Image: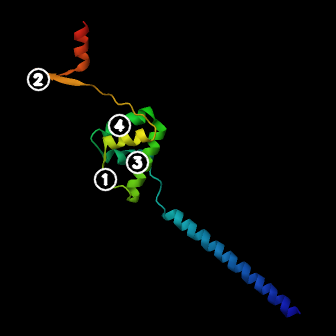
Amino acid sequence: MPDSESDDLDAIKRRKMQEYERRRAMIERQAAAAKNAPTKPNPEDDLKFVRSKLLGRGQEVLDAALSQYPQPALEVVKYIANLYRTGQLNEDIPGEDLYDLFHNLGMRVRLNTTISYVKDGKRVPLSQKFKKGTA
């Protein structure tokens, strides 16, 4: 009898020791992964990175979106930067596409636009013509 009890105790000790080793190894792996994991990019870095990938009026669209919808626009910028970093997106983004993206997300970005025409070699805003016509 004493041998079977000591065998049972030894078996329990072995199981506990194996469980302890398994937990310790898992904690060490997690610590190593956390140490080797890349740090999260700064939102300002994401913004600079995405700005470098914009074409045409993309800068203007992004500035307008950031001024009108600051927090949601930063989330979109962060998402776009993540797409570039993971390799899912590798083309530059035209301003029209960025505008469409914001519009499809429900953010109606208002851009400063003017209509002008050329008269005698000079660019004249259309609003000036209306002012002269009514005066």
What residue is disc 3 on?
46
| In the image, residue 46 above or below residue 26 | above
* Other residues around mark 3 within 10 Å, as few (<14) / some (14–19) / many (≥20): some
Q: Would you identify the image quadrant in which residue 58 lies?
A: top left
At horizontal 43% and vertical 32% (from top left) the residue drawn is 68
Query: Quick one: 48 or 66, which is closer to the camera?
Result: 66
Q: Amino acid at mark 1?
A: Glu
| In the image, residue 6 above or below residue 99 | below
* Other residues around mark 4 within 10 Å, as few (<14) / some (14–19) / many (≥20): many
Circle 3: element type = helix
Alpha-carbon distance for marks 2 and 3? 43 Å
CB of mark 2 within 8 Å of CB of mark 1?
Answer: no
Query: Which is more foreground, mark 2 or mark 3?
Result: 2
CB of mark 3 within 8 Å of CB of mark 1?
Answer: no
Q: Would you identify the image quadrant in which residue 1 lies?
A: bottom right
Earlier sequence position, callout 2 versus callout 1: 1
Q: Which mark is residue 61?
A: 4
Circle 1: element type = loop
